[in-house]
Image (cartoon, helix red, strand yellow):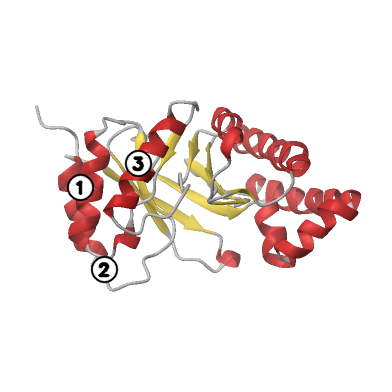
Amino acid sequence: MAADPPEIFLVGVDESLGKLGDYVLSAGPLTDKRWGVSVAGPTELLLRKMGLRTLAKLSVWERDTLKRLHEKALDGVLSFIRSLNPVPDFVLVADDCASYEGPLLPKWYIEEIYLSSHESLVEEIRSIGAAAFLHADGNYGPYFGEIGRMWDLIHPLDIHPRGDLTDYMSWLRAAARIRSKIGSTVATGIAFELGSEELIVRAVKELLKWGLGDIVLSNFHPPLSGLDVRMLVGMIRDALS
């Protein structure tokens, strides 16, 4: 019996973010999630407004000031979530706070502010009847477990560069290790950085060989090259089927 074709889930992005819309390709685990909204999280808003250097200084010398700034940003995001009408199937909060080397801000910030705010965000999202998705680039190391237990989906699992197929295979092994430690679905990100439709589809097929059925193939950032995305989506659909 033929498998059901993968679905495309549309993400409408808050216009104030200045980003294009998104799509998520799934082999099946998100069949009840049709569309959603993306909004910047409180840490990402502070990083955009003030920059990493300023936030790092505040995290060392003016913790109370940083806490107040973050609380204000969090209140704004929570108000946005409460205002959503109609209610989307999911809300995707983009809250980057890590590089490939690890979290960008100190341990106390991650544990007392970043993770705590995520609990509030997840609670608010679920209270309106939506699923809670997190877009968080970088390697969160030991915090992946707690993040995974909170959110319904982490998007993407972006833990180190994937510039060629060799890098991609290393990334795939790391992704599998992390996936085994967390409780949420993981969105990996389509490897547009490979630069060609053929290589990207080969990467998708390598992913499928691992049998990680609940890893969702997705893209958050629009490709910056001349890739034929329409054709690529069709090729990936065929691979997933």
Residue 91 x, y percent position in the rendering: 53, 45
Q: Earlier in the sequence, mark 3 or mark 2?
A: 3
How packed mark 3 is, by other alpha carbons closer than 10 Å (few <14, some 14-19, many 20 or more), is: many
Q: Is residue 215 above or below residue 160?
A: above
Residue 71 x, y percent position in the rendering: 80, 48
In this picture, residue 164 sits left or right of residue 119: left
Amino acid bearing label 1: Arg
Label 2 sits on a secondary structure element that is loop
Label 1 sits on a secondary structure element that is helix
Question: What whole-number distance in Å separates the C-alpha atoms at marks 3 and 2?
Answer: 23 Å
Front of the two marks 1 and 2: 2
Front of the two marks 3 and 1: 3
In this picture, residue 39 sits left or right of residue 57: left
How packed mark 1 is, by other alpha carbons closer than 10 Å (few <14, some 14-19, many 20 or more), is: some
Dot label at residue 227: 2
Residue 75 x, y percent position in the rendering: 76, 48
Residue highlighted by disc 3: 172
Q: Residue at x 61, y 34 (%)?
A: 143
Q: Earlier in the sequence, mark 3 or mark 1?
A: 3
Front of the two marks 3 and 2: 3
Q: Earlier in the sequence, mark 1 or mark 2?
A: 2
Foreground residue, 78 or 168?
Answer: 168
In this picture, residue 89 sits left or right of residue 224: right
Q: How many marks?
A: 3
Foreground residue, 27 or 108?
Answer: 108
Label 3 sits on a secondary structure element that is helix
Question: What whole-number distance in Å separates the C-alpha atoms at marks 1 and 2?
Answer: 16 Å
Question: What whole-number distance in Å separates the C-alpha atoms at marks 3 and 1?
Answer: 20 Å
Residue highlighted by disc 1: 237
| Res 233 quadrant in image | bottom left
Amino acid bearing label 3: Leu
